[in-house]
Image: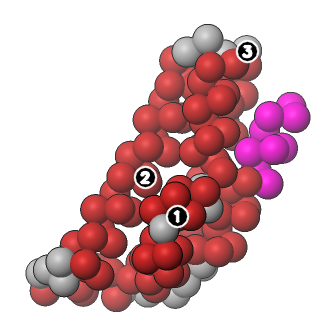
Amino acid sequence: MIYIVLYVIFELYEVQWQKASSMEGMLQNMYKYYSKSIFLFLAMHPTFYFAIIFMLYTHYNMYALILFALKAADIATKLILMKQLFIDKENSAELSVMLQTPIHPLLPYIGLTLYPFLIYMALL
């Protein structure tokens, strides 16, 4: 149970510093840290480190591996999008429309539904 509570705290922290009204706004918030240092950007994702440690703790349980894979894919996607938008300055019209579309205020909290379930299943 402590692992779930700890994860929820970490996830809420990440949601708070990334929060914006659109995906582009979220990426801009992330790029502020990325532009200072890639290590700072990665340090701002404690759930990723939690996933690594939890995966080792559970002896590579399938659910812990899924949690780690999802978190790694999430960070990789963010890095790719930030590079494309802010460094290479290459984005299609379709991508621009998608990134500027307003998102529901609860969308950033979706991780609080899936990830704790994976932690619970890994601990069984």
Residue tagged 2: 74
Question: SS at mark 1?
Answer: helix
Q: Mark 2 or mark 1, which is nearer the start of the sequence?
A: 1
Picture residue at 36% right of the left edge, 52% below the top: 76
Check contact, mark 3 vs mark 2: CB within 8 A. no
Quick one: quadrant of the C terminus?
A: top right
**Residue at image mark 1:** 41
Amino acid on which the number 3 mark rests in the picture: Leu
Q: Quadrant of the N terminus?
A: top right
Q: Residue, x 23% and y 85% (percent of image)? A: 96
Q: Residues within 10 Å of mark 1 (few under 14, many from 20)?
A: some
For the question of whether residue 91 can be seen, the reply is no
Q: Nearer the viewer, mark 3 or mark 2?
A: 2
Q: Amino acid at mark 1?
A: Phe
Disc nearer the start of the sequence (3/2): 2
Q: Does 6 sit above or below residue 28?
A: above
Q: Is residue 40 magenta?
A: no
